[in-house]
Amino acid sequence: MHRLVVNCETGEKELIAYTATEIAEAEAHAARVAEQQAEREAADEKAAADKVSGNAKLKDLGLTDDEIVALTS
């Protein structure tokens, strides 16, 4: 992994290799981001499943689709 360093005064560009510490930090950050994304996706899936389950339970109680929409919106 490398980073590009640009000197704005001279326009000189230099490609610098990451240190082992920087690589480890980047990998740890990527792992945290992936974990957070997985948590968000799981929460979204649970919310969708809960909505379907809740609507089914309301149907079982005898409510019409219009009544369910009125209650849940």
Image (cartoon, helix red, strand yellow):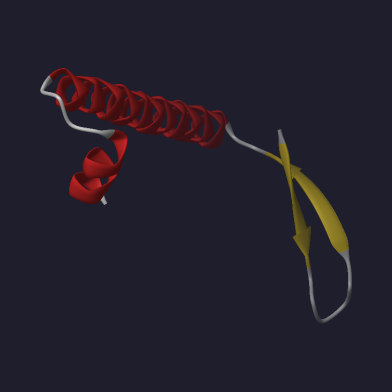
Looking at the picture, tell me which residue is in the foreground, 38 or 47: 47
| Residue at left offset 64%, top offset 37% | 18
Horizontal arrangement in the rendering, residue 60 relative to residue 30 (left or right):
left
Rendering quarter of residue 40: top left
- Relative image position of residue 52 (x, y in whole percent): 30, 24
- Residue at 79 percent across and 71 percent down: it is 7
Q: Nearer the viewer, residue 66 or 54?
A: 66
* Residue extending farthest left: 61
Q: Quadrant of residue 10?
A: bottom right
Quadrant assignment for the N terminus: top right
Q: Name above or below for residue 40 compared with residue 9.
A: above
Residue 8 vertical position relative to residue 49 in the rendered view, above or below: below
x and y percent of residue 38 in the render? Answer: 41, 25
Residue at image coords 79%, 77%: 8
Residue at horizontal 55 percent and vertical 28 percent from the top: 20
Q: Position of residue 11 (x, y in %)?
A: 89, 73
**Left or right: where does residue 14 sit relative to residue 17?**
right
Total residue callouts: 0
Picture coordinates of residue 15, whole percent (x, y): 81, 48
Which residue ends up furthest to the bottom in the rendered image? 9
Query: Relative to residue 67, is residue 10 depicted above or below?
Result: below
